[in-house]
Amino acid sequence: MQKLQVQGLHHVTLVGADRQTSIDFWEGVLGMPFVFEQPNLDVPEESHLYFDPGDGRLITVFTREDRKPDPSRTSTDIGAVHHVAFWLSRATFSQAVRRLDERGIAHSGVKDRGFMDSIYFKDPLGLLIELAAYRFFPPEGVSHGEVLLEAHKIRVARGDPHIAEVHLADAIEDIIRRQRESLSDDRMPRNPY
């Protein structure tokens, strides 16, 4: 028996209300280009809208003109989606609170997550959206996930309750030490002063 090894998220499809509400939110608030539309091939009276979140994947939305937005919080029952998170650059994240406030969109304010910062708000249909900005850049050729795995190991070894910036910095140093050779016999920290 072998795994069905995935290589990334292909797309997420949401049940939307009317077409314009989806376009106004996904493109008009979050800046995702509306890249194509076709009928929902399983339910022809619905439209299937596709948005590009910027990483080569897709967010898609099934819409119908007879469905109206309901801003009540979506289900958080077992098996339901709790929230969807989107990655922002640090520059855009620093503007997010102001830009949400300008639209009158209620939000959580900035939340410290140790390895990233987050802001939470609901879309027009009650889905919780997270805007997330990492506090670190991984070394060239290394993913954020690889740095987080290394930082987790460091955190657990030290008995710390959650990943903090010190764990990230030490993880990046350890990864670079393992991946990049040096002519030095001893690569330990030094104080030349």
Image (cartoon, rainbow, N blue to C red):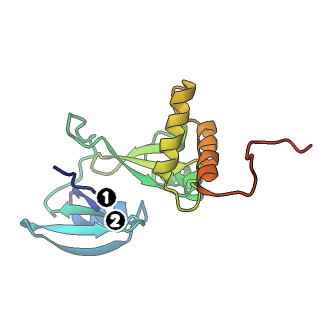
Tell me residue 125's x, y (percent).
Answer: 27, 50
The C terminus, quarter of image: top right
Q: Amino acid at mark 2?
A: Arg
65 horizontally vs 143: left or right: left
Cα distance between the residues tagged 1 and 2: 7 Å
Rendered residue at 35%/60% (across/down)? 25
Residue 132 visible in the current orientation: no
Kind of residue at disc 1:
Leu
Can you give x and y, in whole percent of width and height, for residue 74 in the image? 25, 42
Q: In the rendered image, which residue does mark 2 sit on?
A: 57
In the image, what residue occupies the spot 20% across and 34% down? 78
Q: Are marks 1 and 2 in contact (CB under 8 Å)?
A: yes
Q: Nearer the viewer, residue 136 or 97?
A: 136
Residue 85: where, in percent of width, then height?
A: 39, 49
* Residue bearing the label numbered 1: 9
Q: Residue at x 22, y 51 (%)?
A: 3
Residue 128 position by quadrant: top left
